[in-house]
Amino acid sequence: DQFTLDAPKTKLLAQKVKDMGMDSVLIITDKLDENLVLSARNLPNVLVIEARQADPVSLLRFNNTLITKGAVAKIEEILA
């Protein structure tokens, strides 16, 4: 449903990504979570964007894509 962090800790996000078995990931959310953005900015293999910012280049750049339910709804709305 949601992908958020309790604190802006890069180490915490890196561990979450590693626990999910991902080496690089594009995280698409319906609205940006400040803790998530701050945690991801120092990780070269993680990018956090809003659904309206999703583009084909970003989707192809990362091996994995994590999309929240809210983001899926917004993308469907944009493409409809």
Image: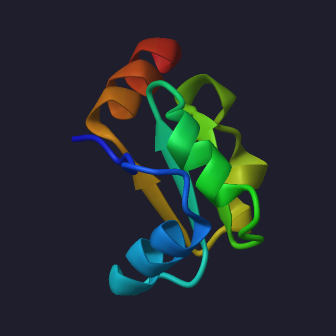
Q: Residue at x 54, y 30 (%)?
A: 32
Examine the rendered structure and indicate whether residue 73 appears above or below residue 22.
above
Q: Residue at x 40, y 51 (%)?
A: 5
Examine the rendered structure and indicate whether residue 50 appears above or below residue 47.
above
The front one of 37 and 65 is: 37
State the quadrant of the C terminus: top left
Indicate the quadrant where residue 16 lies: bottom left
Residue ranking furthest to the left: 1
Examine the rendered structure and indicate whether residue 19 appears above or below residue 43.
below
Indicate the quadrant where residue 30 lies: top left
Q: How is the image coloured?
A: rainbow
Q: Residue at x 72, y 52 (%)?
A: 58
The front one of 77 and 6 is: 6
Query: How far from the left and from the top, in percent, is residue 66?
Result: 43, 56
State the quadrant of the N terminus: top left
Q: Residue at x 77, y 71 (%)?
A: 44
Q: Is residue 28 left or right of residue 57?
A: left
Query: How far from the left and from the top, in percent, is residue 27?
Result: 52, 52
Query: How far from the left and from the top, in percent, is residue 22?
Result: 47, 81
Query: How far from the left and from the top, in percent, is residue 46?
Result: 64, 64
